[in-house]
Image (cartoon, coloured by chain):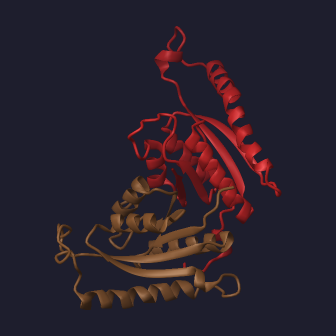
């Protein structure tokens, strides 16, 4: 445990992005670490499955077609965010690998993020303290709090 | 480009905290940062904060704790090869405080203006089923800088 072994390095970094300033700041920190450790970054946006009454058709079901449409609509927006993050790292000399992913979940965002991190064998999650909800007086958002509690790997929380 | 010039890592001798410290050292080596390793000895008398006297820790107890903490510091320093990191950049300190452990850490972090706090999710209390300890929770909530929690 006391050894600074090789496999401890942050080789895969997960950054959950929701388009808030705090999440972009988290991405900047992730890029800084990735440069030093030569890591791969995965930017992830989680869409929470829509409530049935909002999106259901007359039969009361959410069809696969509607789900595809939701993801398609969201991807238009997320691509802008991901481009902004990639732009930031292009100004540096040595490039790093940035992958992006958008997923729809029936779970809570933190449930999906921690599960995704485990499946992809992530070594570090970098997350902003507050997302889009923007409650001014809230110091730590529910998603960040959940990720800290349930993640299997180290979590860097960025103000 | 974001940098970590000063890294703070509070340890209490537990396995979690030492593993956090080794992460901190690894980051410090890569970022060439100054690293502060501290250990907090809170006053055993609760609510003694208002009076400096009651908030104090008996010197004998403090010395005993300090000796123990110095062992942890040495243990951590020994993990570094001297050619990859300047040992002068490691600052160690044992702090006694009438405040709670978390506020003592936060106060130290703010006064030294650190850029990153690295700490374990659980300390010595180490309740098995507890996923995140109270100190880590408070630091994450109130810290002025980014915090890395390590399992």
Pick the front one: A58 or A129: A129
How far across and how far down the image is residue B69, in percent? 40, 85
Q: Residue at x 52, y 8 (%)?
A: A58
In the figure, is residue B71 to the left or right of A73? left
Let me know if residue A117 appears in the view: yes
Q: Residue at x 51, y 50 (%)?
A: A159
Residue furthest toward the top? Answer: A58
Tell me if residue A3 comes above or below residue A86 in the rendering. below
Q: Colour of chain B?
A: brown
Q: Which chain is red?
A: A
Tell me if residue A146 comes above or below residue B102 in the rendering. above
Q: Residue at x 22, y 79 (%)?
A: B56
Q: Quadrant of residue B45?
A: bottom left
Q: Quadrant of residue B143?
A: bottom left
Q: Quadrant of residue B124?
A: bottom left
Tell me if residue A71 comes above or below residue A140 in the rendering. above
Q: Residue at x 44, y 63 (%)?
A: B110
How far across and how far down the image is residue A59, in percent? 52, 10
Pick the front one: A146 or A112: A146
């Amino acid at each position: 445990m006391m050894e600074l072994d090789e496999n401890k390095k942050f080789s895969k970094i997960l950054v959950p992005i929701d388009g808030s300033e705090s999440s972009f700041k988290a991405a900047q920190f992730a890029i800084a670490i990735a440069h030093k450790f030569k890591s791969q970054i995965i930017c992830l946006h989680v869409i929470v499955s829509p409530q049935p009454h909002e999106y259901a058709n007359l039969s009361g079901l959410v069809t696969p077609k509607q789900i595809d449409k939701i993801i398609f609509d969201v991807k238009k927006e997320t691509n802008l965010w991901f481009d902004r993050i990639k732009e930031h790292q292009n100004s540096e000399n040595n490039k790093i690998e940035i992958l992006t992913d958008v997923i729809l979940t029936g779970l809570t965002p933190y449930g999906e993020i921690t599960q995704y991190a485990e499946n992809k064998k992530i070594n570090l999650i970098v997350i902003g303290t507050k997302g889009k909800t923007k409650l001014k007086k809230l110091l730590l958002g529910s998603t960040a709090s959940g990720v800290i509690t349930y993640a299997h790997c180290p979590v860097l929380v960025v103000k | 480009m974001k940098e970590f010039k000063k890294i703070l890592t509070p340890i209490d001798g537990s396995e979690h905290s030492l593993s956090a410290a080794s992460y901190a050292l690894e980051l410090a080596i890569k970022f060439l940062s100054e690293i502060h390793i501290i250990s907090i000895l809170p006053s055993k008398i609760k609510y003694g904060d208002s009076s400096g006297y009651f908030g104090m820790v008996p010197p004998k107890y403090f010395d005993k704790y300090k000796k123990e903490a110095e062992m942890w510091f040495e243990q951590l320093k020994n993990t570094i090869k001297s050619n990859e990191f300047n040992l002068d950049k490691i600052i160690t300190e044992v702090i006694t405080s009438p405040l709670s452990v978390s506020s003592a850490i936060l106060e130290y972090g703010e006064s030294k203006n650190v850029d990153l706090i690295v700490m374990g999710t659980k300390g010595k209390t180490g309740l098995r089923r507890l996923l995140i300890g109270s100190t880590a929770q408070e630091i994450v909530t109130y810290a002025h800088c980014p915090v890395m929690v390590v399992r």
